[in-house]
Amino acid sequence: MVVPLNDGVHTRASKRASLGLSPAKKGKESLNDCLIFEAYIELAGQLRSEGIQAQMVFISSNTKEYREPNKRILKADIGEDLAKVSLEYAANFGEAKHRRGL
């Protein structure tokens, strides 16, 4: 599938970056990080709306942008957005495989 980069994705990513919401960081040009994250949220939402219930995992090794410092728990804003579309987070393929029971 092609990951969507529609106007809604751009708008949500711009808002996320301007508000400094994860994965954005204040004082850093984070729009590209936010575009990637919002595009995958959009894709997962589209798949869920089509009735696909399979487990999905978003993978990014940049844990500083997704997890609380020195912890394995997600930042609240990231966790809320992933939960809306039943999308899980993993820091690497090994963790993703473990979550999938592979």
Image (tube, rainbow, N blue to C red):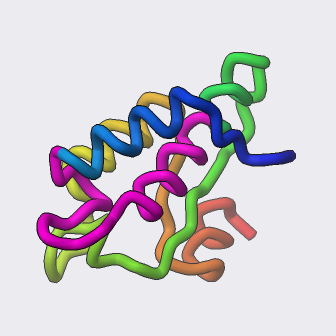
Image-quadrant location for residue 14:
top left
| Residue positioned 57% across, 58% down in the render | 58
Quadrant where the C terminus sits is: bottom right
Compared to 85, does 64 lie above or below? below
Q: How many marks?
A: 0
The magenta segment: 19-42
Check residue 25 for magenta coloring.
yes
Q: State the image coordinates of residue 46 (x, y, percent, origin top left).
A: 69, 26
Along the line of sight, the residue nearer the viewer: 69 or 94: 69
| Residue positioned 37% across, 38% down in the render | 81
Image-quadrant location for residue 13:
top left
Question: For this view, does 100 lie left or right of residue 72?
Answer: right
Along the line of sight, the residue nearer the viewer: 14 or 71: 14
Compared to 77, does 6 lie above or below? above
Compared to 6, does 92 lie above or below? below
| Residue positioned 77% across, 27% down in the render | 52
Compared to 12, does 79 lie above or below? below
Question: For this view, does 38 lie left or right of residue 79?
Answer: right
Check residue 95 for magenta coloring.
no
| Residue positioned 38% across, 58% down in the render | 31
Question: For this view, does 30 lie left or right of residue 6?
Answer: left
Q: State the image coordinates of residue 56 (x, y, percent, origin top left).
A: 65, 48
Q: State the image coordinates of residue 5 (x, y, percent, origin top left).
A: 65, 42
